[in-house]
């Protein structure tokens, strides 16, 4: 069959996840002079994983800052800078090291907006490699999606491909709340097709919205980060056996896009969750709980009630559910306080 003249499809540009994150940070540093990057070896060495390659030469010492090996110290500096009106990107060489600074991430960054009654925002990004890698032992192989996804006041994103990486890092930097960006070390050098819209400086991926990577009718498979690729590979194998999987890339851990997942389960009647973290109290466990509480099982006699007995005195005096006040414009309602 002859090809139609003028309709030859050109191959999309290939961009690695590392390059996509670098491009996103570069564009936001250029767009807003309040944005700066700090962390161990992010400047002259171009980052431990070369994610910040070239940024120090372009923006100098005041915008790209090498720090001492003290996560508690430089995370505290970043939180203070955010409270003062700047927009820091705080890089952890690995999120395993964020445990040294977890008091700053949770008690200083995540809780301030709520404890100030909505008067003090903390626009900060905590980013770096997360999850298991190759030959780095148990102390450097943890997935922190469930850890930080558990904490009210944080937004948590987990990109899989290059499009995710650029769109989510840019949205995280522009957000007025603390955002944890969980990258994956093994994905940094992986190239993906990069659509033309992702190359725009205005390209953003909304936080809190999942993406259906593959349509299916028999099984819903939900995942985030590197395991999304494994799920797509498995779906291809199962398709040859007549089983069509709908693969959902979560993109955001908190706030979770349960509506997209629930709509898929309503269609397929089956759900599998795949993640790189520990199974008990994990992301998959939360998804399963939310499905059980949601529309799919609403006709049953079982239900759950959430009561907010928050920190402030007026909240303690009332046990009636109320809208979320953690994030402006959040539609989560009192059932799942962000």
Image (cartoon, rainbow, N blue to C red):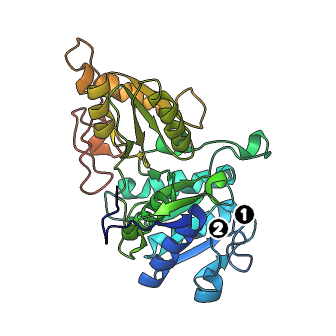
Taking the view exactly as shown, the residue that stands out farthest to the front is: 1
Residue 262 in view, yes or no: yes
Q: Quadrant of residue 259?
A: top left
Question: How busy is the neighbourhood of tag 2: few (under 14 within 10 Å), some, or many (20 plus)?
Answer: many
Q: Position of residue 37 (x, y in %)?
A: 58, 74
Asked whether the residues under the numbered discs 2 and 1 touch, taking CB atoms below 8 Å apart as contact, a structural biologist would say: yes
Mark 1 highlights which residue? Answer: 70
* 39 versus 245 height, above or below: below
Tell me the residue at 22%/40% (across/down): 322
Tell me the residue at 31%/72% (across/down): 6
Q: CA distance from mark 2 to mark 1?
A: 6 Å
Tell me the residue at 67%/65% (across/down): 73
Q: Secondary structure at mark 2?
A: helix
Tell me the residue at 65%/87% (across/down): 57
Mark 2 highlights which residue? Answer: 74
Q: Which of the two residues, 126 or 275, is positioned nearer the viewer here?
A: 275
Image quarter of the N terminus: bottom left
Question: How busy is the neighbourhood of tag 1: few (under 14 within 10 Å), some, or many (20 plus)?
Answer: some
* 89 versus 158 height, above or below: below
Image quarter of the C terminus: top left
Q: Secondary structure at mark 1?
A: loop
Q: Which of the two residues, 191 or 134, is positioned nearer the viewer here?
A: 191
């Amino acid at each position: 069959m002859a090809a139609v003249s003028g309709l030859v499809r050109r191959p999309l540009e290939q961009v690695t996840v590392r390059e996509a994150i670098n491009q996103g940070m570069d564009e936001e540093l250029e767009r807003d002079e309040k944005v700066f990057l700090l962390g161990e070896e992010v400047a002259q060495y171009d980052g431990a994983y070369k994610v910040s390659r070239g940024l120090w030469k372009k923006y100098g010492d005041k915008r790209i800052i090498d720090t001492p090996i003290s996560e508690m110290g430089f995370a505290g500096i970043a939180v203070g800078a955010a409270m003062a009106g700047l927009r820091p990107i705080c890089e952890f060489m690995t999120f395993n090291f964020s445990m040294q600074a977890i008091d700053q991430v949770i008690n200083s960054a995540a809780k301030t907006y709520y404890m100030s009654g909505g008067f003090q925002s903390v626009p900060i990004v905590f980013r770096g490699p997360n999850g298991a890698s190759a030959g780095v032992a148990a102390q450097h192989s943890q997935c922190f999606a469930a850890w930080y996804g558990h904490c009210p006041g944080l937004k948590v994103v987990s990109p899989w491909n290059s499009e995710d990486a650029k769109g989510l890092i840019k949205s995280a930097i522009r957000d007025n709340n603390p955002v944890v960006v969980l990258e994956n070390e093994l994905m940094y050098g992986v190239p993906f097709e990069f659509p033309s819209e992702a190359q725009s400086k205005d390209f953003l991926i909304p936080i809190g919205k999942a993406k259906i990577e593959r349509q299916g009718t028999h099984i819903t498979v939900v995942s985030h980060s590197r395991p999304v690729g494994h799920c797509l590979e498995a779906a291809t194998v199962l398709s040859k056996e007549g089983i069509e999987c709908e693969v959902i890339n979560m993109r955001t851990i908190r706030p979770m896009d349960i509506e997209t997942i629930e709509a898929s389960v309503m269609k397929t009647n089956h759900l599998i969750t795949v993640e790189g973290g520990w199974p008990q109290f994990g992301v998959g466990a939360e998804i399963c709980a939310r499905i059980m509480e949601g529309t799919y099982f609403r006709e049953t006699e079982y239900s759950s009630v959430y009561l907010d007995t928050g920190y402030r005195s007026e909240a303690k005096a009332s046990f009636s559910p109320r809208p979320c006040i953690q994030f402006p414009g959040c539609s989560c309602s009192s059932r799942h306080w962000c």
